[in-house]
Image (cartoon, rainbow, N blue to C red):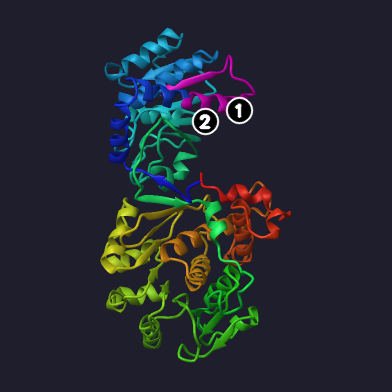
Amino acid sequence: MSDRRGYYTVDEVRAAEAELFTRVPAGMPMRRAAFGLAGVVVDELRSLTGGVAGRGVGLLVGSGDNGGDALWAGAFLRRRGVRVSAVLLDPERAHQEGLAALRAAGGRVVDRLDVVDLVIDGIVGISGRGPLRPGAAEMVAALDVPIVSADLPSGVDPGTGAVDGPAVTADVTVAFGAYKPVHALAVPQCGRIVLVPIGLRLPEAGLVQLDPGAVGADWPVPGPADDKYSQGVVGVCAGSAKYPGAGVLCTGAAVAATSGMVRYAGSDTEVLGKFPEVVASSSISETGRVQAWVFGPGAGTDSGARDRLAEVLGTALPVLVDADGLTMLAEEPGLVRRRSAVTVLTPHAGEFARLTGDAVGADRVGAVRELAEEWGVTVLLKGRATVVASPGQAALVNDAGGDWAATPGSGDVLSGIIGALLAAGREAGWAAGAGARVHALAANLAAHEARDFGAPISATPLLRHVRDAVRVLREVGGGGGAEANGVTGTGAMAMWARPR
């Protein structure tokens, strides 16, 4: 099994489809896709209504191949006894073979959908751009039944996941042949995502998501020859008298993430009160040997903070910069641009705009890649879909599976997790992507507490669930050692670990 899932651009998918057409009979790829789509719809009907025959499915059919996928799926559903009615949004450009197949199977073409149990969205495919047109938007807005989208939700940009007008919000999206960026960047619009293979031969992906099982399998845990030093010592310079909570959250996350040592440099006395295992000193120079630094959360932006940032960045060690540190780098980017050592920046959208002078924009992946290449650093852009880019590498994306981490102090926790991974010797991009995965899972676990419905959380319960999140991911990844065969008590929570 691969340790990552690839997401492919429209051009990459089109090239792979063109190669596929040279190997298989004409029309077969569409029928493969449509058969898979019909199978997903059958499963949804069973789940929703308890049966298939006699149930009603409506098709919203656009022009071109995406509409053809929906029409062929309708024909397959008719053969299962499903009542199928189709609205042709552009009758003159409807896919003729698919339309003939639907009619031959007994499907009907109507002006307005009858009462149905489910609707297939076949309005716009991966070549479409922009929002739904008024007629389609009106029909979609009137629906009160689940929607299954063919390849992507219509009206959502396939490459960026951006929505700039009326668009479908699907309950399920059936991806044909390959995952596209929209399936990682716009999960709330896509709903549950199901991949239907159609035989594509795909290149190495430029956008990937780490497999949660692989994250768990590769997470640093102590081995028989390890001690407190060999597992990585991370230095944390965060928090202040004005913002003591930031130092507590960031340092606590570093303590929770790995078994290595955590050294704290600063004047925040609350850190030791909360985490007595931390080794504290009043200054960076007195901290002792570390393998990586985390700087910024609650550190302030005065001249003293600037000097401390410069001191940390002047080392040859990996450094993660967040929060106040990013504010200072926006004023003095040369502190980072001169570095040859690993640097990780973890901005939210506002901090990103300060660093670059421009808003992130619709193409979040492209914007993060550009900053990473220009500054020679690893950049993690926070959000529901976190994006990580490092120079010369595939970009990473992590859909959080929920929005529970949108709370003050959450980023401080993330910084501590990633810093601990850097100190343990993990590569910067992997550390950022894996840290984002654990962070998102911890937020979901904290919000749900083994219950179906979530409740709002703060950063403190998120921090408390970091170890639970690591444990779940290790369970998904097969664990390691004798405890892998034991009962961890987190199996029911593993659903939160999986990407959609």
Is residue 416 positioned above or below 197 on the image? below
Marks 1/2: CA–CA distance: 9 Å
Image-based side of 231 in relation to 174, left or right = right
Where in the figure is residue 352, as x and y percent of width and height? 34, 64
Give SS at disc 1: helix
Residue 63 visible somewhere in the drawing: no
Is residue 17 positioned above or below 299 on the image? above
**What is the crowding at mark 1: few (fewer than 14 residues within 10 Å), some, or many (at least 20)?**
few
Image-based side of 468 in relation to 318, left or right = right
Asked whether residue 494 is drawn in magenta, I would say no
Q: Earlier in the sequence, mark 1 or mark 2?
A: 1
Asked whether residue 38 is drawn in magenta, I would say yes
Give SS at disc 2: loop
- Give, as a three-letter code, the residue at label 2: Pro
Q: Which residue is mark 2?
A: 146
Residue 252 visible somewhere in the drawing: yes
Is residue 405 positioned above or below 78 on the image? below
* Farthest front residue in view: 225
Where in the figure is residue 387, as x and y percent of width and height? 40, 56
Q: Which residue is mark 1?
A: 48
Picture residue at 30% right of the left edge, 38% below the top: 130
| Count of marks placed on residues | 2
Which numbered tag is attached to residue 488? none
Q: Which residues are magenta?
A: 36-62
Where in the figure is residue 231, as x and y percent of width and height? 56, 74
Where in the figure is residue 474, as x and y percent of width and height? 61, 57
Tag 1 near tag 2, CB within 8 Å: yes
